[in-house]
Amino acid sequence: MKHVWRSWPGRIGVVLVSILVLGALVSLVWTPYDPTRVVPRDKWLPVSWAHPFGTDGAGKDLLSQVLVGARTTLVVALASVVIAAVLGLSLGILSAITPRYVGESLAHLIDVLIALPTLILALVFLAALGGSIWTVSLAIGLGSAAVLARVVRAEVSRVLTNDYILTAAASGSSTYRTVWRHVIPNIAPTVIVQLSLFAALAVLAEAALSYLGLTQVSTPSWGRMLGTLQETMTVEPRAVVFPGLAVLAATLGFNLLGDGLRDAVDPRLRGRAASVSPTFSSVVDGVDDPALVALPAAPDVRPMDIEVP
Amino acid sequence: MSDGAGPLLAVDALTVELGGRKVVDDVSFAVDRGERLGIIGESGSGKTISALSIVGLAPEAATITGSIRFDGEEVLGRDDRRMSDLRGDRIAMVFQDPRTALNPVMRVGRQISEPLRLHRGLDRKAAAAAAVELCARVGLPDPDRIVRAYPHQLSGGQRQRVGIAMAMSCRPALLIADEPTTALDVTVQADVMGLLQQLVIEEGTALILITHDIALVSGVVSHIVVMRNGRIVERGAALDVARDPHHEYTQQLLEAARTTSWHGSSTNGDRP
């Protein structure tokens, strides 16, 4: 974790995702108001100490709603990423290490899965299985798993050509042990970046589906808030800002966290931000500086001439 | 398992076909316990693929015929699981390029002790201690620190020492070294070769040294096999072959080695 903290993207990502997690956790035990309580005389209250995000047209507290909505966002992001990781990794690895005809068939299966648009898949699942957040996670997870499987297949094939795989085999390591100890650690940086990207996409996809009103009304969600608030946006544009910012922050947070994690997991990239890159950038800066570039072109030999008696 | 009689490794009429081409053609040689054999030839002469065939790591597309007997038992066509038991334990390998032969994201100590954990069932703690000991054995400075390093933090020569430590960790009966010094700086080549020689002599390990540099091996190995285009063109005691090569190709190889060293000394001599 300390390696993630070394880079700015990592830091911002950790902070944003921590806020999301904290908000979701806090909402389990405490919210400023009951997010579902309608108080007609408090409708469209502006930002104040009593209502930091203001209230909506029914007088419901927006901060409380955003906090509760963080739960849904977090659960969907995590659940879909877990599904994508388990399915995508196993499918991708299997298709790369099994005999050619099995591997090729799996690769074709992956291509077919990728051809199904994730949101359309989600619509079908929601229609067939109902609008719970688990249905949403399953659909987004499956869609991401297909993409991840293809990336993993290519990465594993690349890693398997490396000499250290041969070294492992010559040490008596079985195929599965080699995959576990040598292949997976080497594809981990790529997989982590992909997964963080999927988490960000899951946040957006969940928001989109609930914005359209396809998820259960009982599940609090930023997307649903945006959907309701946009109906009155021309009159009360202020209220839309907060759920919108929440979606933005969560998406950005997962993306940046992925960047930070990638650098932290790969020992070859570690410490680069601390030691190598300042030197490198100062060299580049030096070359970019016109005064420095001009220097070697203007050799000054006069002082030498003067010294000759 | 070991009856002590007969050679440790007997390769008989080994032929490897790859993509319809015979890359190894009717190759036979034997290595006794503790014996050191050099396989000499230019790149593409089939020496590496012969070595990989011995440990069952030849490309899957290759068709292999003939016989490879290790310790009296046929190993050709053995299933992979049983070959895995042999690899790293009784037959170990050192590869050519130490820059790529180590896992870049695994600490050096864990890589060195991997064969021990696989074949001797050492736990994490015992393996870590063994790794430090092995590092010291192959002359790596500050072993306690080096086992915690990642490969990219070591020099090429140090990495090859790590590769040798890994290969020797289970005290194999046979070590196959495939161009172990080719990718190294000239200055450390002799050190690494010396270390290899010292270790196999101390441990009584048989050695197959694969190289294109006939001058480099003639002091290390007792016998030489010269390969060209997949065939053995000359064989004999190392000193005899180096002194009095019969085949034209061996003479060329020797000539090449000699010119290189002549070149080196003359440049030094010319300097004022």
Image: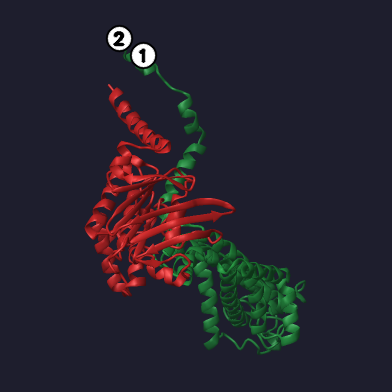
Chain colours: A green, B red
| Co-location on one chain, circles 1 and 2 | yes
Secondary structure under tag 2 reads loop
Counting from the top left corner in percent of width and height, residue A178 is at: 46, 68
- Could you classify mark 2 by the number of other residues whose Cα lies within 10 Å: few (under 14), some (14-19), or many (20 or more)? few
Residue shown at the point (61%, 81%) measured from the top left: A72
From this viewpoint, which residue is outermost toward the left? B202
- In the picture, the quarter occupied by the N terminus of chain B is bottom left
The chain identifier of the residue carrying mark 2 reads A
- In the picture, the quarter occupied by the C terminus of chain B is top left
Report which quarter residue A57 is drawn in.
bottom right
- Could you classify mark 1 by the number of other residues whose Cα lies within 10 Å: few (under 14), some (14-19), or many (20 or more)? few
Secondary structure under tag 1 reads helix
**Circle 2: residue type:** Pro
* Residue B234 visible from this viewpoint: yes
Residue located beneath label 2 in the image: A309
Residue shown at the point (54%, 62%) measured from the top left: B60
**Residue B92 against residue B124 in the figure, above or below:** above
**Circle 1: residue type:** Asp
* Residue A214 visible from this viewpoint: no
Counting from the top left corner in percent of width and height, residue A100 is at: 61, 66
Residue shown at the point (29%, 28%) measured from the top left: B268
* Closer to the camera in the image, A49 or A65: A65
Report which quarter residue B53 is drawn in.
bottom left
How far apart are the alpha carbons under marks 1 and 2? 8 Å
